[in-house]
Image: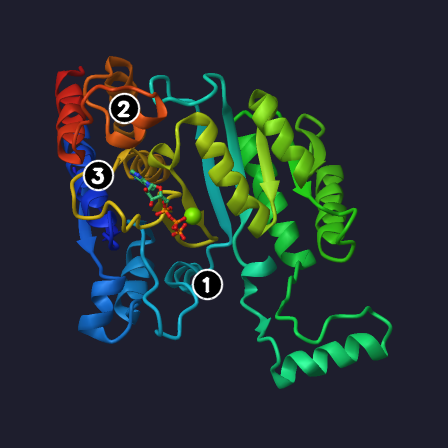
Amino acid sequence: MAKRTVTLIPGDGIGLETSAAMQRVVEASGAAIAWEVAEAGAHTMENCGTPLPDSTIEAVKRNGVAIKGPITTPVGTGFRSVNVALRRALGLYVCLRPVLSLPGAGGRYDDVDMVIVRENSEDLYAGIEFEEGSQAARDLIRFCEETGAGAIRPDSGISVKPISVTATRDIVEYAFDYAAKHGRTKVTAVHKANIMKHSDGLFLRVAREVAEERAASIGFDDRIVDAFCMNMVVDPSQFDVVVFPNLYGDIASDLAAGLVGGLGIAPGANIGKRYAVFEAVHGSAPDIAGQDKANPTAQILSAAMMLDHVGERVAAERIRRAVRAVYADGKYLTADIRKATRSSERAARCSEFTAALEEALEQMD
Ligand code: ATP
Ligand code: MG
């Protein structure tokens, strides 16, 4: 069978270890995947003078699909975030994060099965900021005063939060399409429309419009973000597909990951109309990088999402079954999971956990 080429961006920090583990597991799953490795991150900065070379973006465009490890944004590079720059260059307007209980992973709940759909291009991530005391900040403060918009203290730094009709429509339509395609029954929009009428208020209004236009077979409701957090902690099983503006989606992703076992097991994808980049929710975790301690589950489950995306459904399901088996068995679990389960048993190294997964895959028929 011809192999499908996928771009692999190993990233940096624990990304080097989790990416290697992921490759071994995909190999053992029998998926017909060939890797084209592309560089990005701190070490790339030293070699290429930029943490995100054009050749890496070209590689993703050429193959259409990529999987990446976390990337640290080195200071003083002219990038606010390499990850945000990559999403922008590829038009990846959706951040998709399935949150699924994994028995044995130490989560607070065993019945969570929700999907976070996070807007990926605007909101406070737009990067429009005015430094405290700068001319631009002073002009803006004067403008707000003169137009009666409101008083801002002169010693304020200011970040701008744009939320557009276009991006909101795109993300909410994606959430409904995703729900329809995956047999899910409800979309919930999360916002703070009572306080921010022209940004979150717009988000809610457009979400309601899209819901009206869509088939009634998929329900719709909304939550104010603070109430959403409380509801999540008390009973996360009530949520199905949940759509967020960028920042709330970021925070809710970590909250949700924490409820089902932590960042070590939370997979994700950034998806656009033409390209898709799969990656774990977690960052580069410099505190444990290079020590064979990282939990590669999040990136391995991201690879399973990638395999679904390229039509390798059987291999994807084999990987998920192997992950469930190794967690249920409980013998080879990494330090983060031992901590989450308050277990005093010896923690497995990243490489030992990976070997256990390979063995589970080999024994599967
Ligand atoms: P970012 O700004 O990129 O989100 P962050 O500062 O939030 O990064 P992360 O790297 O996401 O930090 O993770 C926070 C901490 O959680 C890490 O320092 C590490 O201790 C732990 N952690 C994250 N991912 C993993 C993993 N895969 N395995 C084990 N521990 C992890
Ligand atoms: Mg983080």
Relative to residue 121, is residue 9 drawn left or right?
Answer: left
Among numbered discs 1 and 3, the one appearing first in the sequence: 3
User: Circle 3 is placed at which residue position?
Assistant: 22
Among numbered discs 2 and 1, the one appearing first in the sequence: 1
Distance from disc 2 to disc 3, alpha carbons, whole Å, reads: 12 Å
Label 2 lies in ligand 1 vicinity (Cβ under 8 Å): no
**Residue in the image at 70% along x and 50% along y:** 203
Residue 175 percent location from the top left of the image: 58, 39
| Dot 2 alpha-carbon crowd within 10 angstroms: few under 14, some 14 to 19, many 20 or more | many
Say the numbered circle drawn on residue 88: 1
Mark 3 secondary-structure assignment: helix
User: Circle 2 is placed at which residue position?
Assistant: 323
Residue 344 appears in which quarter of the rendering? top left
Mark 2 secondary-structure assignment: helix
Q: Is residue 135 visible?
A: yes
Q: In terms of depth relative to the viewer, which is nearer, 55 or 233?
A: 233
**In the picture, which quadrant includes the C terminus?**
top left
Among numbered discs 2 and 3, the one appearing first in the sequence: 3
Q: Is residue 122 visible?
A: no
Q: Amino acid at mark 3?
A: Met
Distance from disc 2 to disc 1, alpha carbons, whole Å, reads: 32 Å
**Residue in the image at 17% along x and 48% along y:** 290
